Amino acid sequence: MFYKRSLLLAALCFLFAGLGASAHEVSADEAPFPFEPLQMFDFPARDFPITRYGARKDDPKATMKAFEKAMQACNKAGGGRVVVPQGEWVTGTIHFKDSCLLYLSEGSTLVFEDDPSLYLPAVHTSWEGTECMNYSPLIYAFGCKNVGIAGSGTIAPKMDFWRTWFARPEEHIQATRQLYAMCSTGVAVEHRRMEEGKANMRPHLIQFNRCTNVTLDGFKIRESPFWTIHLYLCKDAWVHGLDVYAHGHNNDGIDIEMTSRAVVEDCVFDQGDDAVVLKSGRNQDAWRLATPTEDIVIRRCTVVQGHCLMGIGSEMAGGVRRVYMHDCHLSDAAYRLFYLKTNHRRGGFIEDICMENVTGKSVRTVFEIDTDVLYQWRDIVPTFETAITRIRNISLIGADCEQADAVYRINGDSRDPVQGVLLKDVHIGKVNKYINESTNCRNVVTDNVVWDSFDASGTEFLLNGFAPGI
């Protein structure tokens, strides 16, 4: 009887705590598609400092355990903030529970030890668009609701060990072959064990996987083992005021993948790879999950360096639609300002994408669509199944760039040509190589696309970021 009463009391406490929860709206009325305001969860005013649960600045295992206990207590109480106090705290992986906000106090630095054993056992995650079991992301949430990270502190993982995995030795190539084959032949995710042997598949820094109502607000990031922020199969996300720097290999800034209804605003990204990226999975995995990335607004963001201001793909087999980026700025250099990339293995679609009122300093190409981007996979893995990507209704309206090697390039696929591209009110100060190079595309409209000078013998574009551009 006492046990039943205890369960009832706990359930009532949780219910009453939930009744007191409130939300705030994040609107995007300017979007060229219907966008109902996000109803973002307001975390209850309850703090669970990690020091209360045994965290010690010089003991990553003790601090990792403290995070686990603090998340449990916060969740059991109905939600609140798991607080990282001022100072430098070394830890291993952090896993979320519902209704928990990881709060980084002013002057705090969360340092992740670069010991792979701290990120085991393996979790359900992904590698470049393919689902697998792998080392846990350093910060990880799976199937959670009402979660997030906020505060003015810093996330700064140690990188000495992870850098040794930047290269692609033969063992890593063999593991990627195996994962590709398992995806293509329908092997269950739980049997795709990428943490075993020498696969050397680095973990994400932050991954919210299958989560609802995600808040990322105000903190700083300094370096990442792999993709920096990954919103994967999520619904309703607000990303605000972040300061992100990561110039290692595969260091995308934010990857929004198979996710619906997100606003990214007032952030700064300085990346060794793409900056703001829309993805939706690779090949058969994406077709199985059948979840497009859709209804995304990116506004008032700055990219210092990166491979592009906004990129879509190349993992986009589930489809990407209704994306609007506006009033963003490239302050240094990128390979492309606006880049759509896919290949004949992806299928899916890219449609109703608009970039508007953007500025940039130096790029190789202002606007580019390439349907033959296979990177290293061209030769190391076969084509199991051909599926052509449908690309429709893509717009760049109001862009100003100081210099570019080329204005636009469209490399469509003859089996389903790109259709419906609008380039309007685009100004480039100096063009160094060529104006446009387009094949297999229809209904391409240019309106007031102008440049001040053209010199085909100009200096070739160079980017001083880490990863090579393709």
Image (tube, rainbow, N blue to C red):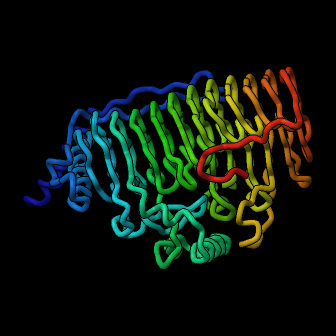
The image shows residue 208 at horizontal and vertical percentages of: 45, 50
The image shows residue 3 at horizontal and vertical percentages of: 11, 60
Q: Quadrant of residue 433?
A: top right
The image shows residue 27 at horizontal and vertical percentages of: 52, 25
Q: Is residue 258 above or below residue 105?
A: below
Q: How many marks?
A: 0
Residue at the image point whose x is 53% and y is 70% from the top: 189
Q: Is residue 91 above or below residue 124?
A: above
Residue at the image point whose x is 44% and y is 50% from the top: 206
Q: Is residue 325 above or below residue 411?
A: above
Residue at the image point whose x is 73% and y is 58% from the top: 346
The image shows residue 177 at horizontal and vertical percentages of: 65, 74
**Side of 234 where 433 appears, left or right:** right
- Nearest the camera: 142 or 426? 426
Q: Is residue 176 above or below residue 350?
A: below
Residue at the image point whose x is 50% and y is 76% from the top: 198
Give the residue furthest to the left: 2
**Side of 122 where 305 appears, left or right:** right
- Nearest the camera: 436 or 99? 436
**Which image quarter holds the N terminus?**
bottom left
Is residue 159 visible in the rendered structure shown here?
yes
Is residue 95 visible in the rendered structure shown here?
no
